[in-house]
């Protein structure tokens, strides 16, 4: 049973940076062909996608339009971690950020499909950006 644990949330001022981490519990998970992604949900709003990737050789990194120029998804196989590096943060980035995964998808293209069945989720990490 895969478990995902986020860390690294916090409060920053506009223009600041934060890096979120997502630890996968299954050994070797990030080195193999799985989808891992980041989503967020602000109070009173629907959950939205942020970034995702097929973890084998970091294929098909996909970003939502607001994330393309400011956020980067990366990984560290030795730590079995996926990261979301966020820069130039804005108050509208305030949300709870969730790590999610799809184990052994049929191919990398699945990871870019925000409507796919993301089956495993972390508990969330709060990011607050103040003006």
Image (tube, rainbow, N blue to C red):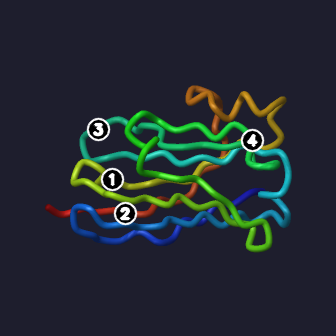
Q: CA distance from mark 2 to mark 3?
A: 15 Å
Label pair 2/1, CB-CB below 8 angstroms: yes
Residue drawn at 85 percent across, 63 percent down: 28
Q: Which disc is residue 45 wearing? A: 3
Q: Nearer the viewer, residue 97 or 61?
A: 61
Q: SS for tag 4?
A: strand
Q: CA distance from mark 2 to mark 1?
A: 6 Å
Q: Position of residue 70 (x, y in %)?
A: 41, 50
Q: Residues within 10 Å of mark 4 (few under 14, many from 20)?
A: some
Residue designated by label 1 = 95
Q: Position of residue 37 (x, y in %)?
A: 60, 46
Q: The N terminus is located in which quarter?
A: bottom right
Residue designated by label 4 = 59
Q: CA distance from mark 3 to mark 4?
A: 30 Å
Left or right: 6 as drawn, with respect to 60: left
Label pair 3/1, CB-CB below 8 angstroms: yes
Q: Earlier in the sequence, mark 2 or mark 1?
A: 1
Label pair 3/4, CB-CB below 8 angstroms: no
Q: Residues within 10 Å of mark 2 (few under 14, many from 20)?
A: some
Mark nearer the viewer, 1 or 4: 4
Q: Position of residue 34 (x, y in %)?
A: 78, 45
Q: Earlier in the sequence, mark 2 or mark 4?
A: 4
Residue drawn at 82 percent across, 30 percent down: 107
Residue designated by label 2 = 126
Q: CA distance from mark 3 to mark 1?
A: 9 Å
Q: Earlier in the sequence, mark 3 or mark 4?
A: 3
Q: CA distance from mark 1 to mark 4?
A: 27 Å
Q: The C terminus is located in which quarter?
A: bottom left
Q: Earlier in the sequence, mark 3 or mark 1?
A: 3
């Amino acid at each position: 049973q895969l478990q995902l644990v986020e860390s690294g949330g916090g409060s920053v001022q506009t223009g600041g940076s934060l890096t979120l981490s997502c630890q996968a519990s299954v050994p070797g998970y990030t080195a193999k062909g799985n989808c891992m992604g980041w989503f967020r949900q602000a109070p009173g709003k629907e959950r939205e996608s942020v970034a995702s990737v097929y973890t084998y050789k970091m294929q098909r990194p996909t970003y939502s339009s607001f994330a393309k120029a400011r956020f980067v998804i990366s990984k560290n196989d030795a730590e079995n971690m996926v990261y979301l590096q966020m820069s130039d943060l804005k108050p509208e980035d305030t949300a709870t950020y969730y790590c999610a995964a799809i184990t052994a998808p049929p191919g990398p293209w699945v990871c870019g499909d925000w409507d796919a069945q993301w089956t495993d989720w972390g508990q969330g990490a709060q990011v607050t950006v103040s003006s």
